[in-house]
Image: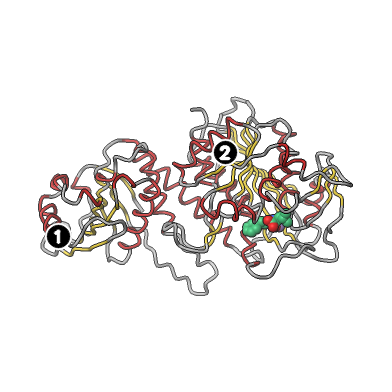
Amino acid sequence: MRFEGNRSVSKAYKEAVVVPLFENAVTRLSWIGEFDSALHKDIAHVISKGDFKGKQSAMLTLYRPEANFKRVVLVGAGKKREFNLEKLRKLVASVDTAVQQFNVRGYTMLIEPLLPLSASDYIVGKACAEAIVLSRFEFDAFKSKQEKTKKDLNVVFWGAPRGDFNKGIQDGVTIGANVNFVREIVNTPSNTLTPAVLAEKAQAIARELPGLSCTVFDKNKIEELGMNGIISVAKGSICEPKFIILEYDGAQGKQGRPIVAVGKGVTFDTGGISLKPCNGMEKMKYDMGGAGAVIGFMKSAVELKLPYHLVGIIPTVENMPSASAYKPGDVITMASGKTVEVLSTDAEGRLILADALDYAVKNYNPSALFDLATLTGACMVALGNKAVALMGNNRGIMRKAQQYAENSGERVWELPLWDDYSEMIKSDVADIKNTGGPGAGTITAGAFLKEFVGNTPWIHMDIASTAWMDTTERGYLCKGATGVGVRLLCEIIRNWNK
Ligand code: BES
Ligand code: MN
Ligand code: ZN
Protein backbone atom coordinates (compact mmCIF):
# COMPACT_ATOMS: atom_id res chain seq x y z
CA MET A 1 0.00 0.00 0.00
CA ARG A 2 1.48 3.31 -1.07
CA PHE A 3 -0.11 6.70 -0.50
CA GLU A 4 1.47 9.93 -1.60
CA GLY A 5 0.65 13.43 -2.69
CA ASN A 6 2.37 15.00 -5.65
CA ARG A 7 1.90 17.26 -8.63
CA SER A 8 3.49 15.16 -11.30
CA VAL A 9 0.95 13.82 -13.76
CA SER A 10 3.37 11.08 -14.79
CA LYS A 11 3.19 9.58 -11.29
CA ALA A 12 -0.61 9.43 -11.37
CA TYR A 13 -2.40 6.08 -11.65
CA LYS A 14 -4.08 5.98 -15.03
CA GLU A 15 -6.54 3.15 -14.37
CA ALA A 16 -8.78 5.26 -12.16
CA VAL A 17 -8.97 8.98 -11.42
CA VAL A 18 -11.25 10.50 -8.82
CA VAL A 19 -12.44 14.07 -9.38
CA PRO A 20 -14.26 15.71 -6.46
CA LEU A 21 -16.34 18.76 -7.33
CA PHE A 22 -18.23 21.24 -5.20
CA GLU A 23 -21.83 22.01 -5.99
CA ASN A 24 -21.21 25.57 -7.05
CA ALA A 25 -17.90 24.84 -8.75
CA VAL A 26 -19.00 22.39 -11.43
CA THR A 27 -18.68 25.11 -14.03
CA ARG A 28 -15.20 26.17 -12.94
CA LEU A 29 -13.22 23.27 -14.29
CA SER A 30 -10.27 24.84 -16.01
CA TRP A 31 -7.88 23.56 -13.32
CA ILE A 32 -8.57 20.03 -14.56
CA GLY A 33 -6.90 21.02 -17.80
CA GLU A 34 -3.66 21.32 -15.89
CA PHE A 35 -3.96 17.63 -15.07
CA ASP A 36 -5.20 16.41 -18.44
CA SER A 37 -6.86 18.45 -21.16
CA ALA A 38 -8.89 15.57 -22.66
CA LEU A 39 -10.25 14.80 -19.20
CA HIS A 40 -11.19 18.43 -18.75
CA LYS A 41 -13.13 18.32 -22.00
CA ASP A 42 -15.00 15.12 -21.12
CA ILE A 43 -15.98 16.32 -17.67
CA ALA A 44 -17.13 19.68 -19.05
CA HIS A 45 -19.28 17.71 -21.50
CA VAL A 46 -20.92 15.60 -18.77
CA ILE A 47 -21.64 18.70 -16.74
CA SER A 48 -23.09 20.62 -19.67
CA LYS A 49 -25.58 17.76 -20.10
CA GLY A 50 -26.72 18.40 -16.52
CA ASP A 51 -25.95 14.86 -15.36
CA PHE A 52 -23.65 15.84 -12.49
CA LYS A 53 -24.15 18.76 -10.12
CA GLY A 54 -21.65 18.10 -7.36
CA LYS A 55 -24.29 17.27 -4.75
CA GLN A 56 -22.83 15.70 -1.64
CA SER A 57 -22.10 11.97 -2.10
CA ALA A 58 -23.27 11.94 -5.74
CA MET A 59 -21.01 9.66 -7.76
CA LEU A 60 -20.69 9.08 -11.49
CA THR A 61 -18.22 6.79 -13.23
CA LEU A 62 -17.07 7.38 -16.81
CA TYR A 63 -15.29 4.65 -18.79
CA ARG A 64 -12.89 6.08 -21.36
CA PRO A 65 -11.20 3.11 -23.08
CA GLU A 66 -9.53 5.28 -25.72
CA ALA A 67 -8.22 7.91 -23.33
CA ASN A 68 -5.14 8.13 -21.19
CA PHE A 69 -7.09 7.94 -17.94
CA LYS A 70 -9.38 4.91 -18.23
CA ARG A 71 -11.89 5.31 -15.45
CA VAL A 72 -13.00 8.61 -14.02
CA VAL A 73 -15.11 8.89 -10.91
CA LEU A 74 -16.84 12.21 -10.40
CA VAL A 75 -17.77 12.67 -6.78
CA GLY A 76 -19.89 15.44 -5.30
CA ALA A 77 -18.39 17.35 -2.38
CA GLY A 78 -21.56 19.32 -1.63
CA LYS A 79 -21.58 22.99 -0.78
CA LYS A 80 -18.13 24.50 -0.56
CA ARG A 81 -18.79 26.65 2.49
CA GLU A 82 -20.19 23.66 4.38
CA PHE A 83 -17.19 21.48 3.59
CA ASN A 84 -15.01 20.47 6.51
CA LEU A 85 -12.51 17.82 7.60
CA GLU A 86 -15.16 15.31 8.63
CA LYS A 87 -16.87 15.66 5.24
CA LEU A 88 -13.47 15.17 3.62
CA ARG A 89 -12.95 11.94 5.60
CA LYS A 90 -16.38 10.66 4.60
CA LEU A 91 -15.85 11.61 0.97
CA VAL A 92 -12.43 9.97 0.76
CA ALA A 93 -13.76 6.84 2.46
CA SER A 94 -16.78 6.53 0.18
CA VAL A 95 -14.58 7.01 -2.89
CA ASP A 96 -12.13 4.39 -1.67
CA THR A 97 -14.97 1.95 -1.07
CA ALA A 98 -16.39 2.59 -4.55
CA VAL A 99 -13.03 2.17 -6.29
CA GLN A 100 -12.51 -1.15 -4.49
CA GLN A 101 -14.84 -2.79 -7.01
CA PHE A 102 -12.55 -1.88 -9.92
CA ASN A 103 -9.88 -4.25 -11.07
CA VAL A 104 -7.02 -1.79 -10.47
CA ARG A 105 -3.81 -1.58 -8.40
CA GLY A 106 -4.31 1.99 -7.41
CA TYR A 107 -5.99 5.26 -8.23
CA THR A 108 -5.38 8.97 -8.42
CA MET A 109 -7.45 11.42 -6.47
CA LEU A 110 -7.43 15.05 -7.54
CA ILE A 111 -7.28 16.64 -4.13
CA GLU A 112 -6.68 20.17 -5.42
CA PRO A 113 -10.25 21.48 -5.42
CA LEU A 114 -10.76 20.37 -1.82
CA LEU A 115 -7.65 21.99 -0.43
CA PRO A 116 -8.70 25.45 0.67
CA LEU A 117 -9.93 23.99 3.96
CA SER A 118 -9.01 26.01 7.02
CA ALA A 119 -6.86 23.14 8.30
CA SER A 120 -3.15 22.81 7.50
CA ASP A 121 -1.90 20.57 4.70
CA TYR A 122 -0.55 18.20 7.36
CA ILE A 123 -3.99 17.82 8.93
CA VAL A 124 -5.65 17.36 5.52
CA GLY A 125 -3.12 14.68 4.55
CA LYS A 126 -3.60 12.94 7.86
CA ALA A 127 -7.40 13.04 7.53
CA CYS A 128 -7.24 11.51 4.02
CA ALA A 129 -4.94 8.68 5.05
CA GLU A 130 -6.83 7.91 8.26
CA ALA A 131 -10.15 7.84 6.42
CA ILE A 132 -8.86 5.34 3.87
CA VAL A 133 -7.09 3.09 6.35
CA LEU A 134 -10.08 3.12 8.72
CA SER A 135 -12.60 2.45 5.97
CA ARG A 136 -10.63 -0.61 4.84
CA PHE A 137 -10.97 -2.24 8.27
CA GLU A 138 -12.82 -5.55 8.33
CA PHE A 139 -13.27 -7.65 11.45
CA ASP A 140 -13.23 -11.24 10.27
CA ALA A 141 -11.05 -12.88 12.93
CA PHE A 142 -13.96 -15.07 14.00
CA LYS A 143 -15.33 -16.02 10.59
CA SER A 144 -14.50 -19.62 9.73
CA LYS A 145 -13.79 -18.48 6.18
CA GLN A 146 -11.72 -15.34 6.13
CA GLU A 147 -13.62 -13.09 3.79
CA LYS A 148 -11.64 -9.88 3.30
CA THR A 149 -13.27 -7.84 0.57
CA LYS A 150 -11.08 -4.74 0.75
CA LYS A 151 -7.85 -4.44 -1.20
CA ASP A 152 -4.77 -2.41 -0.29
CA LEU A 153 -5.01 -0.13 -3.32
CA ASN A 154 -2.33 2.50 -3.77
CA VAL A 155 -3.41 6.13 -3.88
CA VAL A 156 -1.79 9.19 -5.43
CA PHE A 157 -3.25 12.50 -4.28
CA TRP A 158 -2.62 14.87 -7.13
CA GLY A 159 -2.32 18.57 -6.43
CA ALA A 160 -0.94 18.46 -2.92
CA PRO A 161 2.42 20.00 -3.59
CA ARG A 162 3.52 21.13 -0.16
CA GLY A 163 5.71 18.84 1.92
CA ASP A 164 3.56 18.67 5.01
CA PHE A 165 0.75 16.95 3.17
CA ASN A 166 2.90 13.87 2.72
CA LYS A 167 4.03 13.94 6.35
CA GLY A 168 0.35 14.03 7.27
CA ILE A 169 -0.30 11.06 4.99
CA GLN A 170 2.50 9.08 6.62
CA ASP A 171 1.37 9.83 10.17
CA GLY A 172 -2.24 9.18 9.21
CA VAL A 173 -1.34 5.71 7.90
CA THR A 174 0.47 4.94 11.17
CA ILE A 175 -2.33 6.23 13.37
CA GLY A 176 -5.07 4.65 11.24
CA ALA A 177 -3.38 1.26 11.43
CA ASN A 178 -3.18 1.57 15.20
CA VAL A 179 -6.83 2.60 15.47
CA ASN A 180 -7.66 -0.55 13.49
CA PHE A 181 -5.46 -2.58 15.82
CA VAL A 182 -7.50 -1.22 18.74
CA ARG A 183 -10.78 -1.98 16.94
CA GLU A 184 -9.57 -5.54 16.50
CA ILE A 185 -8.92 -6.07 20.23
CA VAL A 186 -12.03 -4.19 21.38
CA ASN A 187 -14.21 -6.29 19.04
CA THR A 188 -12.62 -9.49 20.31
CA PRO A 189 -15.10 -11.30 22.55
CA SER A 190 -14.36 -11.73 26.22
CA ASN A 191 -13.98 -15.51 26.12
CA THR A 192 -10.90 -14.84 24.00
CA LEU A 193 -9.80 -11.48 25.31
CA THR A 194 -9.39 -11.95 29.06
CA PRO A 195 -7.34 -9.62 31.30
CA ALA A 196 -4.38 -12.00 30.96
CA VAL A 197 -4.64 -11.96 27.16
CA LEU A 198 -4.87 -8.16 27.13
CA ALA A 199 -1.70 -8.05 29.23
CA GLU A 200 0.04 -10.43 26.81
CA LYS A 201 -0.95 -8.19 23.88
CA ALA A 202 0.61 -5.18 25.63
CA GLN A 203 3.77 -7.18 26.29
CA ALA A 204 3.93 -8.38 22.70
CA ILE A 205 3.78 -4.78 21.45
CA ALA A 206 6.56 -3.76 23.82
CA ARG A 207 8.72 -6.63 22.59
CA GLU A 208 8.22 -5.48 18.99
CA LEU A 209 8.88 -1.80 19.56
CA PRO A 210 12.27 -0.68 20.80
CA GLY A 211 11.86 2.07 23.36
CA LEU A 212 8.57 0.76 24.72
CA SER A 213 8.65 -1.23 27.94
CA CYS A 214 5.84 -3.16 29.59
CA THR A 215 5.40 -4.30 33.19
CA VAL A 216 2.46 -6.42 34.31
CA PHE A 217 1.44 -6.82 37.95
CA ASP A 218 -0.43 -10.01 38.81
CA LYS A 219 -3.10 -10.44 41.47
CA ASN A 220 -0.60 -10.90 44.33
CA LYS A 221 1.22 -7.71 43.49
CA ILE A 222 -2.06 -5.79 43.07
CA GLU A 223 -3.12 -7.05 46.50
CA GLU A 224 0.23 -6.14 48.00
CA LEU A 225 -0.17 -2.59 46.72
CA GLY A 226 -3.54 -2.34 48.46
CA MET A 227 -5.46 -1.80 45.22
CA ASN A 228 -8.65 -3.22 46.65
CA GLY A 229 -10.83 -1.46 44.09
CA ILE A 230 -9.32 -3.68 41.42
CA ILE A 231 -9.26 -6.78 43.65
CA SER A 232 -12.91 -6.32 44.65
CA VAL A 233 -14.26 -5.98 41.11
CA ALA A 234 -12.24 -9.01 39.97
CA LYS A 235 -13.43 -11.21 42.85
CA GLY A 236 -16.44 -12.62 41.02
CA SER A 237 -14.47 -13.81 38.02
CA ILE A 238 -12.24 -16.82 37.50
CA CYS A 239 -10.02 -14.49 35.49
CA GLU A 240 -7.37 -12.86 37.65
CA PRO A 241 -6.94 -9.09 37.37
CA LYS A 242 -3.84 -7.59 35.77
CA PHE A 243 -2.27 -4.17 36.06
CA ILE A 244 -0.43 -3.17 32.90
CA ILE A 245 2.16 -0.39 32.66
CA LEU A 246 3.55 0.73 29.30
CA GLU A 247 6.37 3.28 29.31
CA TYR A 248 8.10 5.19 26.54
CA ASP A 249 10.71 7.85 27.15
CA GLY A 250 10.62 9.85 23.95
CA ALA A 251 12.12 12.80 25.82
CA GLN A 252 15.45 10.93 25.71
CA GLY A 253 16.23 11.00 29.39
CA LYS A 254 15.53 14.73 29.73
CA GLN A 255 13.97 13.68 32.97
CA GLY A 256 10.89 15.51 33.85
CA ARG A 257 7.41 14.63 34.89
CA PRO A 258 5.80 12.22 32.43
CA ILE A 259 2.38 12.44 30.82
CA VAL A 260 0.32 9.48 31.99
CA ALA A 261 -2.76 7.98 30.29
CA VAL A 262 -4.96 5.51 32.18
CA GLY A 263 -7.52 3.30 30.39
CA LYS A 264 -10.41 1.27 31.76
CA GLY A 265 -9.89 -2.39 30.93
CA VAL A 266 -13.06 -4.27 31.88
CA THR A 267 -12.92 -7.18 29.43
CA PHE A 268 -16.57 -7.91 30.14
CA ASP A 269 -19.06 -6.04 32.30
CA THR A 270 -22.07 -8.10 33.36
CA GLY A 271 -22.76 -5.56 36.10
CA GLY A 272 -21.81 -8.17 38.72
CA ILE A 273 -24.39 -8.84 41.45
CA SER A 274 -26.13 -5.62 40.28
CA LEU A 275 -26.66 -7.57 37.08
CA LYS A 276 -27.31 -5.71 33.83
CA PRO A 277 -30.41 -6.48 31.75
CA CYS A 278 -29.64 -9.12 29.13
CA ASN A 279 -30.73 -6.97 26.21
CA GLY A 280 -27.55 -5.66 24.58
CA MET A 281 -25.28 -7.14 27.23
CA GLU A 282 -23.16 -8.75 24.53
CA LYS A 283 -21.80 -5.31 23.74
CA MET A 284 -20.14 -5.08 27.14
CA LYS A 285 -17.09 -6.72 25.59
CA TYR A 286 -16.20 -3.17 24.56
CA ASP A 287 -15.86 -2.08 28.17
CA MET A 288 -12.10 -2.21 27.65
CA GLY A 289 -12.24 0.51 24.97
CA GLY A 290 -10.29 2.88 27.21
CA ALA A 291 -7.57 0.28 27.64
CA GLY A 292 -7.49 -0.25 23.89
CA ALA A 293 -7.14 3.48 23.30
CA VAL A 294 -4.19 3.71 25.70
CA ILE A 295 -2.42 0.78 24.03
CA GLY A 296 -3.08 2.24 20.56
CA PHE A 297 -1.89 5.66 21.68
CA MET A 298 1.34 4.34 23.24
CA LYS A 299 2.07 2.30 20.12
CA SER A 300 1.46 5.35 17.93
CA ALA A 301 3.57 7.60 20.15
CA VAL A 302 6.56 5.29 19.74
CA GLU A 303 6.06 4.91 16.00
CA LEU A 304 5.61 8.67 15.51
CA LYS A 305 8.56 9.27 17.84
CA LEU A 306 6.62 11.84 19.87
CA PRO A 307 9.31 13.57 21.96
CA TYR A 308 7.74 13.07 25.38
CA HIS A 309 8.05 10.80 28.36
CA LEU A 310 4.78 8.87 28.26
CA VAL A 311 3.26 6.22 30.49
CA GLY A 312 0.13 4.15 29.82
CA ILE A 313 -1.60 2.38 32.71
CA ILE A 314 -4.34 -0.22 32.38
CA PRO A 315 -6.19 -1.87 35.24
CA THR A 316 -7.95 -4.87 33.73
CA VAL A 317 -10.60 -7.16 35.20
CA GLU A 318 -13.76 -9.05 34.33
CA ASN A 319 -16.91 -8.00 36.24
CA MET A 320 -18.95 -11.13 37.05
CA PRO A 321 -21.62 -12.19 39.52
CA SER A 322 -20.72 -15.29 41.53
CA ALA A 323 -20.52 -16.64 45.07
CA SER A 324 -17.20 -14.87 45.48
CA ALA A 325 -18.28 -11.59 43.87
CA TYR A 326 -18.24 -8.26 45.70
CA LYS A 327 -21.67 -7.05 46.76
CA PRO A 328 -23.75 -3.93 47.22
CA GLY A 329 -23.13 -2.57 50.69
CA ASP A 330 -19.52 -3.72 50.79
CA VAL A 331 -17.03 -1.11 51.94
CA ILE A 332 -13.68 -1.09 50.18
CA THR A 333 -10.50 0.55 51.45
CA MET A 334 -8.88 1.82 48.28
CA ALA A 335 -5.12 2.08 47.62
CA SER A 336 -5.30 5.77 48.46
CA GLY A 337 -6.75 4.97 51.90
CA LYS A 338 -10.18 6.39 51.06
CA THR A 339 -13.11 4.14 51.89
CA VAL A 340 -15.84 3.48 49.33
CA GLU A 341 -19.31 2.12 49.93
CA VAL A 342 -20.46 -0.01 46.99
CA LEU A 343 -24.02 0.85 46.07
CA SER A 344 -23.87 -0.80 42.68
CA THR A 345 -21.40 -3.46 41.58
CA ASP A 346 -22.13 -2.16 38.08
CA ALA A 347 -20.28 1.07 38.85
CA GLU A 348 -17.07 -0.96 38.69
CA GLY A 349 -15.05 1.12 36.24
CA ARG A 350 -14.50 3.99 38.65
CA LEU A 351 -13.26 1.53 41.30
CA ILE A 352 -10.50 0.10 39.16
CA LEU A 353 -9.63 3.50 37.68
CA ALA A 354 -9.41 5.09 41.12
CA ASP A 355 -6.63 2.70 42.15
CA ALA A 356 -4.85 3.20 38.83
CA LEU A 357 -5.05 7.01 39.07
CA ASP A 358 -3.74 6.83 42.62
CA TYR A 359 -0.88 4.62 41.44
CA ALA A 360 -0.04 7.09 38.67
CA VAL A 361 -0.06 10.06 41.03
CA LYS A 362 2.13 8.36 43.64
CA ASN A 363 4.64 6.72 41.33
CA TYR A 364 5.01 9.15 38.43
CA ASN A 365 4.06 12.61 39.69
CA PRO A 366 2.61 13.26 36.20
CA SER A 367 2.75 16.68 34.55
CA ALA A 368 -0.60 15.68 33.07
CA LEU A 369 -2.86 12.76 33.81
CA PHE A 370 -5.48 11.51 31.34
CA ASP A 371 -8.01 8.79 31.72
CA LEU A 372 -10.24 7.21 29.08
CA ALA A 373 -13.12 4.98 30.05
CA THR A 374 -16.40 3.55 28.81
CA LEU A 375 -17.67 4.73 32.17
CA THR A 376 -21.37 5.58 32.07
CA GLY A 377 -24.49 4.81 30.08
CA ALA A 378 -25.55 8.36 30.96
CA CYS A 379 -22.88 9.62 28.57
CA MET A 380 -25.01 8.24 25.74
CA VAL A 381 -28.02 10.17 27.07
CA ALA A 382 -26.05 13.41 27.31
CA LEU A 383 -24.11 13.45 24.03
CA GLY A 384 -25.18 10.47 21.94
CA ASN A 385 -22.37 8.98 19.90
CA LYS A 386 -21.26 12.40 18.65
CA ALA A 387 -18.75 13.45 21.29
CA VAL A 388 -16.53 12.28 24.13
CA ALA A 389 -17.56 13.72 27.51
CA LEU A 390 -14.70 15.76 28.93
CA MET A 391 -14.18 16.67 32.57
CA GLY A 392 -11.16 17.64 34.61
CA ASN A 393 -9.49 19.80 37.22
CA ASN A 394 -7.17 21.75 34.94
CA ARG A 395 -8.26 24.48 32.52
CA GLY A 396 -5.03 24.37 30.50
CA ILE A 397 -5.28 20.69 29.60
CA MET A 398 -9.02 20.89 29.03
CA ARG A 399 -8.41 23.70 26.58
CA LYS A 400 -5.72 21.73 24.75
CA ALA A 401 -8.08 18.77 24.45
CA GLN A 402 -10.84 21.01 23.12
CA GLN A 403 -8.51 22.81 20.73
CA TYR A 404 -7.10 19.70 19.07
CA ALA A 405 -10.11 17.40 19.23
CA GLU A 406 -11.86 18.86 16.19
CA ASN A 407 -8.88 18.31 13.88
CA SER A 408 -8.43 14.77 15.17
CA GLY A 409 -11.93 13.79 14.07
CA GLU A 410 -12.84 12.90 17.65
CA ARG A 411 -14.90 15.61 19.28
CA VAL A 412 -14.98 16.35 22.99
CA TRP A 413 -17.59 18.27 24.95
CA GLU A 414 -17.07 19.57 28.44
CA LEU A 415 -19.32 18.74 31.37
CA PRO A 416 -18.95 20.68 34.63
CA LEU A 417 -17.33 19.20 37.73
CA TRP A 418 -18.53 21.65 40.33
CA ASP A 419 -18.14 20.75 43.99
CA ASP A 420 -21.92 20.36 44.20
CA TYR A 421 -21.53 17.10 42.29
CA SER A 422 -18.98 15.82 44.80
CA GLU A 423 -21.65 16.26 47.48
CA MET A 424 -23.74 13.71 45.59
CA ILE A 425 -21.24 10.89 46.22
CA LYS A 426 -20.85 11.36 50.00
CA SER A 427 -21.68 8.17 51.89
CA ASP A 428 -23.37 7.64 55.24
CA VAL A 429 -21.04 4.80 56.22
CA ALA A 430 -17.82 5.39 54.25
CA ASP A 431 -15.94 8.41 52.81
CA ILE A 432 -17.70 8.19 49.46
CA LYS A 433 -20.07 5.88 47.57
CA ASN A 434 -19.68 4.56 44.05
CA THR A 435 -22.92 5.95 42.60
CA GLY A 436 -24.38 9.43 42.79
CA GLY A 437 -28.10 8.90 42.51
CA PRO A 438 -30.37 9.43 39.54
CA GLY A 439 -29.13 12.67 37.93
CA ALA A 440 -25.85 13.62 36.24
CA GLY A 441 -24.50 10.07 36.06
CA THR A 442 -21.56 10.94 33.83
CA ILE A 443 -20.52 13.83 36.06
CA THR A 444 -20.81 12.01 39.39
CA ALA A 445 -18.57 9.30 37.92
CA GLY A 446 -16.08 12.05 37.07
CA ALA A 447 -16.48 13.51 40.56
CA PHE A 448 -15.65 10.07 41.98
CA LEU A 449 -12.40 9.87 39.99
CA LYS A 450 -11.49 13.41 41.02
CA GLU A 451 -11.23 12.16 44.62
CA PHE A 452 -8.16 10.14 43.61
CA VAL A 453 -6.03 12.56 41.60
CA GLY A 454 -5.28 15.18 44.27
CA ASN A 455 -3.74 18.28 42.69
CA THR A 456 -2.35 16.48 39.66
CA PRO A 457 -3.49 18.20 36.44
CA TRP A 458 -6.03 15.70 35.16
CA ILE A 459 -8.71 15.20 32.52
CA HIS A 460 -11.26 12.42 32.31
CA MET A 461 -12.79 11.34 29.00
CA ASP A 462 -15.94 9.23 29.08
CA ILE A 463 -15.97 7.31 25.79
CA ALA A 464 -18.98 5.09 26.57
CA SER A 465 -21.01 6.35 23.64
CA THR A 466 -18.25 6.94 21.07
CA ALA A 467 -16.34 3.66 21.48
CA TRP A 468 -18.99 1.67 19.64
CA MET A 469 -21.13 2.28 16.55
CA ASP A 470 -24.43 0.55 15.85
CA THR A 471 -24.72 2.20 12.44
CA THR A 472 -22.42 3.08 9.54
CA GLU A 473 -23.28 6.80 9.64
CA ARG A 474 -19.64 7.81 10.14
CA GLY A 475 -18.75 6.33 6.75
CA TYR A 476 -15.16 5.42 7.50
CA LEU A 477 -16.20 3.63 10.72
CA CYS A 478 -18.02 0.35 10.22
CA LYS A 479 -20.30 -1.11 12.90
CA GLY A 480 -18.63 -2.18 16.11
CA ALA A 481 -15.59 -0.85 17.94
CA THR A 482 -14.39 2.57 16.76
CA GLY A 483 -10.96 2.70 18.40
CA VAL A 484 -11.89 6.16 19.72
CA GLY A 485 -9.24 7.95 21.73
CA VAL A 486 -6.18 7.07 19.68
CA ARG A 487 -6.60 9.85 17.11
CA LEU A 488 -7.54 12.30 19.85
CA LEU A 489 -4.63 11.53 22.19
CA CYS A 490 -2.14 11.53 19.32
CA GLU A 491 -3.27 14.96 18.18
CA ILE A 492 -3.28 16.45 21.69
CA ILE A 493 0.21 15.16 22.49
CA ARG A 494 1.62 16.02 19.06
CA ASN A 495 0.74 19.65 19.84
CA TRP A 496 1.62 19.44 23.52
CA ASN A 497 4.33 22.10 23.61
CA LYS A 498 2.64 24.53 21.22
N1 BES B 1 -19.53 -0.07 31.39
C1 BES B 1 -20.66 0.60 31.95
C2 BES B 1 -21.03 1.87 31.19
C3 BES B 1 -21.53 1.66 29.80
C4 BES B 1 -22.88 1.48 29.57
C5 BES B 1 -20.67 1.72 28.73
C6 BES B 1 -23.35 1.32 28.29
C7 BES B 1 -21.14 1.57 27.45
C8 BES B 1 -22.48 1.37 27.22
C9 BES B 1 -20.38 0.98 33.39
O1 BES B 1 -19.56 0.12 34.08
C10 BES B 1 -21.69 1.02 34.08
O2 BES B 1 -22.30 0.00 34.17
N2 BES B 1 -22.09 2.17 34.56
C11 BES B 1 -23.33 2.31 35.24
C12 BES B 1 -23.13 3.20 36.42
C13 BES B 1 -24.30 3.27 37.33
C14 BES B 1 -24.52 1.93 38.02
C15 BES B 1 -24.06 4.34 38.36
C16 BES B 1 -24.34 2.90 34.26
O3 BES B 1 -23.98 3.77 33.47
O4 BES B 1 -25.47 2.43 34.26
MN1 MN C 1 -20.72 -1.49 34.91
ZN1 ZN D 1 -18.27 -0.99 32.95
Tell whether 86 sits left or right of 69.
Answer: right
Residue topped by disc 2: 211
Cα distance, mark 1 to mark 2? 55 Å
Q: Is residue 54 visible?
A: yes
Q: Is 84 placed above or below 146 here?
A: above
Is residue 367 found left or right of 115 in the rendered image? right
Say which element carries label 2. loop
Q: Which mark is residue 46?
A: 1
Residue lying at 75% horizontally and 54% vertically, measured from the top left: 241
Residue 50 is situated, as x and y percent measured from the top left of the image, at 16, 61
Q: Position of residue 369 (x, y in %)?
A: 64, 36
Q: Quadrant of residue 13?
A: bottom left
Q: Quadrant of residue 274?
A: bottom right
Q: What scheme was used to colour the molecule?
A: secondary structure
Q: Is residue 185 left or right of residue 51?
A: right
- Contact between marks 1 and 2 (CB within 8 A): the answer is no
Which element carries disc 1, helix, strand or loop?
Answer: helix
* Residue 286 position (above or below residue 202): below
Amino acid of disc 2: Gly
Where does the image place residue 463, in percent across and percent down from the top left? 59, 50
Give the quarter the ligand 1 occupies. Answer: bottom right
Give whichever of 403, 55 is nearer the camera. 55
Which residue is most to the bottom?
A: 144
Q: Label 1 sits on what residue type?
A: Val
Front one among 341 and 319: 341
Q: Is residue 287 visible?
A: no
- Residue 301 is tagged as none
Earlier sequence position, callout 1 versus callout 2: 1
- Compare residues 296 and 388 and report the one nearer the observer: 388
Task: Categorize mark 1 by other alpha carbons within 10 Å: few (<14), some (14-19), many (20+).
Answer: some
Disc nearest the viewer among 1 and 2: 1
Q: Position of residue 354 (x, y in %)?
A: 74, 44
